[in-house]
Image: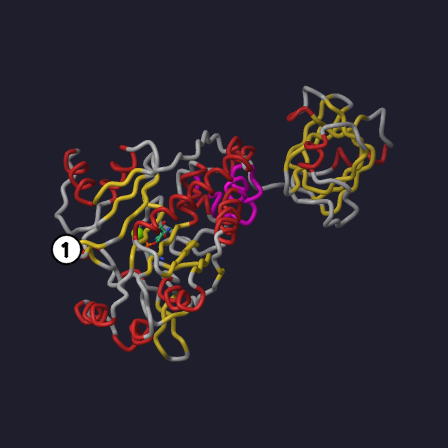
Amino acid sequence: LSTRFKVGGRTHTISELFSENRELDTTILGWVQNKSRVGGVIFLTIRDGSGYIQTTFKKDQVSAEVFEKAKEVTVESAVKVSGRTKIDKRAPGGLEIVGKEFEIIAKAEPWPIVKSAVKSPSFLYDIRHLSIRGKRASSAIKIRSKVIEAAADYFFKNGFYLISAPTIVQSACEGGATLFEVNYFGKKAFLTQSAQLYEEAAIAALERVWTVEPCFRAEKSKTSKHLTEFWMIEAEVAFATHEDIMRLEEELVVEITNRVANECSQELNILGRKFKPPEPPFYRITYDEARELIMKKGIFFEWGEDIPTEGEKIISNEFDKPVFIKEFPLSARSFYHMTKPDNDKVTLSSDLIAPEGYGEITTGGQRLSDYSELEKRVMQQELPRESFEWYLELRKYGMPPHSGFGLGVERTVRWIAGLKHIRAASLFPRTLTRLNP
Ligand code: 4AD
Ligand code: MG
């Protein structure tokens, strides 16, 4: 928050006061996060969008009217405080405001989120519209913002165009099992699972594109890593191979993790997360190697099946930084994947697995760019050809080899912020059982 965007008579944001770190006259706006009284002194912790600061009102140093207002103000009321900052080792962060003037802008009713009311974690999500004001909840959301900011900076620095694809679609990118159906004026439509197919059309015009958009999956299982609506950062690059795209993913994840570590240390601290950004290069193993490792630990699955959740967890815990699992069997993948030149059962694709048990954060790979091969796949997998006609047609008009990937925003935030459940990475999570607020 910059004072250049001034509203409501504020002279500083709280973070600006801490970076000034000296005595000065100030007016801040915010909310009362906490209130206590020791004798003739009222302590208010004020929160704005940028941070928290302790404010004191001393009975013998302010007008009776100001003291009365400080005494009666309730937690979560919106307020305006004027005073002088003072360096004081006893105050959190070493700085406090000695209050002189005080205005209650909007008084709050008794705050419902008190220890005795919080009987289950789901209570906090039932009143998410209020609980997002909490230190931990808002820290996760600030980290999410930084993840997207860092990705945007990375892509724009590297010559990518931002595109936006439709979210109401007819062609399913990732298979029928998780599609949400929409009645589109009597026609059957779906909510998008991924912008990939549209990105592929766009690269023939723009060469390198990226997008960040909501994706929808009718996930029927309750897990700590699935949302039914989540955001995906996706990129697609003309002329790029699968190897190129893994390098891009690696660079992007390095950029994102370093930015969060450097610029969100306050938020990571609040969440109790000790996060060290991973050093490139990340590990790279094949599906076959991953399967062997997993089976050695007693979890069996047939070659050709997708890696089961417990198996993914084993890989995730095995390595001390992110690891690409590449060369997935075609049978475990969507229809558009390119296969290896010498093995048509194995795709040029990979999942990036975050460490510490967090698991998959990206999937990427090279796409089929040949018309007749893709046509064969559409028929083999009995996809509704009419809705893929346009996607096929791209291959008739100069479609070079190309690759891309998608990174789940909330999955990535969950890992970096060390969140138990992915819902904490979403402002208003949508899951199998939650549609409100
Ligand atoms: O692995 P997915 O399904 O891959 C695709 O959709 C590709 N079309 C992307 C591309 O190549 N452009 O999804 C990509 C990522 C996953 O790795 C995961 O991080 C996240 O999206 N994701 C989910 N996040 C939360 N809840 C869900 N239900 C998710 N499903 C996928
Ligand atoms: Mg995937």
Image quarter of residue 294: top left
Residue 300 located left or right of residue 256:
left
Residue 368: quarter of image: bottom left
Query: Would you say residue 354 sits in the magenta stretch?
Result: no
Residue beneath the point at 39% across and 62% down: 195
Q: Which residues are magenta?
A: 120-142
Q: Is residue 147 above or below residue 189?
A: above
Q: Which residue is mark 1?
A: 343
Rendered position, 292 above or below 350: above
Residue 322 in picture, x, y percent from top left: 34, 38
Q: Which quarter of the image is occupied by the N terminus?
A: top right
Q: Residues within 10 Å of mark 1 (few under 14, many from 20)?
A: few
Locate residue 158 relative to residue 176 in the image: left or right: right
Q: How is the image coloured?
A: secondary structure
Give the image location of residue 123, x and y in percent. 47, 43
User: Residue 360: image x %, image y %?
Assistant: 32, 45
Assign a secondary structure to mark 1. Answer: strand
Q: Residue at x 76, y 34 (%)?
A: 70
The residue positioned farthest toward the bottom in the image shown: 186
Give the vertical position of 244 relative to 161 (above or below): above
